Image (cartoon, helix red, strand yellow):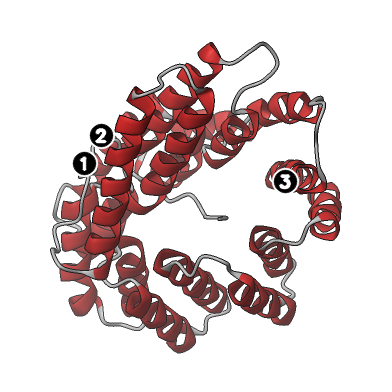
Amino acid sequence: MLWVLACVTPDAPSSPVEEGSAFDLHLAELDARIEARESWVAGSPTDWTRRQVIAGEYTQRARLSGDLRDYARAEEHLTQGFSNAPQGSGPLLSRAGLNYTLHRLDRVEADLRMAEQAILIDEVKKASIALLRGNTLWQSGRYDEGRELMERAHGLHPTPQGTLALALDAWRRADFPRAEGLFDQAEEDLVVRDPATFAWLDLQRGLMDLERGHYDQALDHYRDADAHLDGYWLVEEHIAEVLVLQGHADQALPMYLAIVERTGNPEFMDALAELQPDADWPAKARAAYEEQLALYPESAAGHALGHMLEFGSPDEALELALANLQT
């Protein structure tokens, strides 16, 4: 699954406040699966393949929960997996994928090269390596090289993840009809009909409309996403964002307050600073960003930069910008 990393805070709650929502139930199911996996791993603690599986579960949870500690738990299992794996083996692609997700792009290539040295490597794995390498190059600003590898991966073994990568590339080149068609194709090709994935796809469609100033259409897509997974804080935040743009700040304010209470997300605190200028939201956001930067500086720098540009000093903003450029 290809997801866009949301800016989150390390001490976000492990479950949403809104009980009974589809999101709440979805997260509870994932938690039950993780609990079972933990017992499974404990039964054979030196089996690195089991560590790889549970690391994937924690990564999936992090994308939903908005809790950076879930990424830390995934990383702990991968680190333990490598300590038990023979030299030159281990959960290489999983670690490369996690580093990509956390914007630690300079760490991805070494694991991809080692994975390519495996004695047995089929077309599926070759495609996975090419896709991750292409995504990494693309995120590094090497768009043509990245796109070429994405297309090569798609030719080796088409997957919804590969189609989504090409959709995001088309979007960023302002080829919106192609992007929309690729999003539709990815959705049609999904093997696991997961409500979180459907919600994410509708969220991306909404973001494309938002960039073009099509607020009504964006809101329609966000409502569709909410129908797939009601109670998902990331979707609710985007709904609130459009409401502000449409002149309905009075409706957006209680939504933002509830979302910040649930997530502790500093980006949403910055949004509240505009809606409640007399409150001390910038200081609270700064404290949350500092926690993020301490835990995962590469993934937090780009988000914190926006805060520093608006509420911090030029020197702080420059320092973050240079750090973000190097990742």
Mark 1 or mark 3, whichever is nearer to me: 3
Residue type at the position of mark 3:
Ser
Q: Are marks 1 and 3 in contact (CB under 8 Å)?
A: no
Task: Residue 281 in the image: state x and y as whole percent.
Answer: 21, 49
User: Of residues 38 and 253, which is closer to you in this image?
Assistant: 38
Residue 201 position (above or below residue 8): below
Q: Which corner quadrant of the image does residue 178 belong to?
A: bottom right
Q: CA distance from mark 2 to mark 3?
A: 38 Å
Q: Which picture quadrant has residue 41?
A: top left
Q: Secondary structure at mark 3?
A: helix
Q: How many marks?
A: 3
Name the residue carrying label 2. 287
- Mark 3 — residue? 128
| Image location of residue 105, percent across then percent down | 64, 33
State the mark number for residue 284.
Answer: 1
Per the image, label 1 sits on a secondary structure element best described as helix
Query: Which is nearer the N-term, disc 2 or disc 3?
Result: 3
Residue drawn at x 13%, y 63% is 19
> Can residue 31 be seen from the camera position used here?
yes
Which image quadrant for residue 62?
A: top left
Please state which of the two labelled residues, at mark 2 or mark 3, is closer to the viewer.
Answer: 3
Classify mark 2: residues with Cα within 10 Å, few (<14), some (14-19) or many (20+): some
Along the line of sight, which residue is nearer the eye, 138 or 157? 157
- Residue at position x 68%, y 69% from top? 171
The residue type indicated by label 2 comes to Ala
